[in-house]
Image: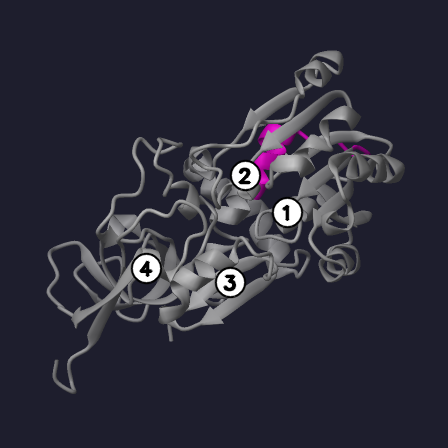
Amino acid sequence: MTATTTAHQQWIYRHQPVGVVGPEHYELTTQPLSMALSEGEVLVASRFISVDPYMRINQSRKPTYNAEPHPLNVVQSAGGVGQVLASQSPGLAVGDWVEGMLGWQTHARMHHSALRRLDPDFAPVSTALGVLGMPGRTAWFGLTESGRPHAGEVVVVSGAAGAVGSLVAQFAKKHGCRVLGIAGGAEKCRWLTESLGLDWALDYKSFRDAQGLSDAIKACTGGVDVYFDNVGGWITDAIFPIIHRRARIVICGTISQYSGGLDEAELGPRFLQHMLYQRATIQGMLARDYAHRMDEMLRVVGPWVQRGEIVFAETIVYGFAELPATLNALFTGEHRGKLLVEVG
């Protein structure tokens, strides 16, 4: 490459992780950037790249909600936000901000139909990967469609300081619910009550077992009407014995199982008798099931964001080279809210 040639970098997914995912499962490649475009195509320079727990699910050796695992020897799939560098589409011009599945690469050549144009004056463009993107859609429809909250009910959210959990908790407050958030560490718990306005927050790290956590939740709330589960494992074990009649349990994620438990998962909670006694329901939900209703969510949540009524925390890691390590950081609990990599 000459001094005037733009370098195009990609993280290629080479090896399937068994436990913790990290840089050793990827290869960083560099080649000259081609500006050639076909009719309808757009060349995008990536600015922010999303790092999400579902990416680790897709690396399972067994089918999950995809027909097959993420293929090896291709660019790691991921959502991203960037600016148009060149366009063969009349609907997108050079300099426009867009969001789409750009992948772990510094530049993406996409058909215009796979991109969503953003208005940078409406909200920071990074929100298209968080509160006004897939996590927001997950939180909104997971709570309202599966959780069906009513004013005065108790909503418990695990992973409450994360990208989805922090929004679920605030949306539940908007519905007039009393909300308890479960998170890791006293600092996160203070943030949940002081910044997000939750009624209670519990640090799961301060409990030795599910029974202790269950007793603490019941002491705060008296029981659970809606449980929004982002974590699974023993934290979820703590919930089932204290659900109220006709409780709704929303299974959004089981992040406790993602670093080694995907292919050989731990036994689930022995919950069926509680489901029977309380005539409760349990339902899994995926953001993709509501992709066609994105505008519906934006009409409600967008004005809240503009008016400053929703806190959308972002943890931004600088540098394209940091992507594999940042994916691993999802499972260490060292971030708050939406985790992003700024390409630079």
Task: Using the numbered discs, state the Cα–Cα distance from disc 3 to disc 4 in whole angstroms.
Answer: 26 Å
Q: Do the residues labelled 2 and 1 touch (CB within 8 Å)?
A: yes
Farthest bottom residue in view: 3
Q: Who comes first in sequence, dot 3 or dot 4?
A: 4
Q: Who comes first in sequence, dot 1 or dot 3?
A: 3
Is 170 positioned to the left or the right of 16 in the image? right
Q: Is residue 103 at all visible to an observer of this figure?
A: no
Magenta span: predominant SS is helix
Badge 4 crowding class, 10 Å Cα cut-off, few under 14, some 14 to 19, many 20 or more, is many
Task: Using the numbered discs, state the Cα–Cα distance from disc 1 to disc 3 in whole angstroms.
Answer: 28 Å
> Could you tell me residue 185's position as x and y percent?
72, 57
Q: Which residue is drawn at 40% across and 73% down?
A: 319
Is residue 107 or residue 223 the one in the foreground? Answer: 223
Which residue was labeled with disc 3? 122
Q: Write down the quadrant of residue 272 in the picture.
A: top right
Task: Using the numbered discs, state the Cα–Cα distance from disc 4 to disc 1 in whole angstroms.
Answer: 25 Å
Which residue was labeled with disc 1? 159
Q: Which amino acid, by three-letter code, is at mark 3? A: Phe
Q: Is residue 141 at all visible to an observer of this figure?
A: yes
Q: Give the range drawn in magenta.
A: 139-153
Q: Who comes first in sequence, dot 2 or dot 1?
A: 1
Q: Write down the quadrant of residue 69 in the picture.
A: top left
Task: Using the numbered discs, state the Cα–Cα distance from disc 2 to disc 1 in whole angstroms.
Answer: 9 Å
Which residue was labeled with disc 2? 253
Task: Using the numbered discs, state the Cα–Cα distance from disc 4 to disc 2 in whole angstroms.
Answer: 23 Å
Which residue was labeled with disc 4? 104
Q: Which amino acid, by three-letter code, is at mark 2? A: Gly
Is 211 positioned to the left or the right of 316 in the image? right
Task: Using the numbered discs, state the Cα–Cα distance from disc 2 to disc 3 in whole angstroms.
Answer: 30 Å
Query: The residue tagged with tag 1: helix, strand or loop?
Result: loop
Q: Residue at x 51, y 63 (%)?
A: 122
Q: Which residue is drawn at 47% across and 44% down?
A: 295
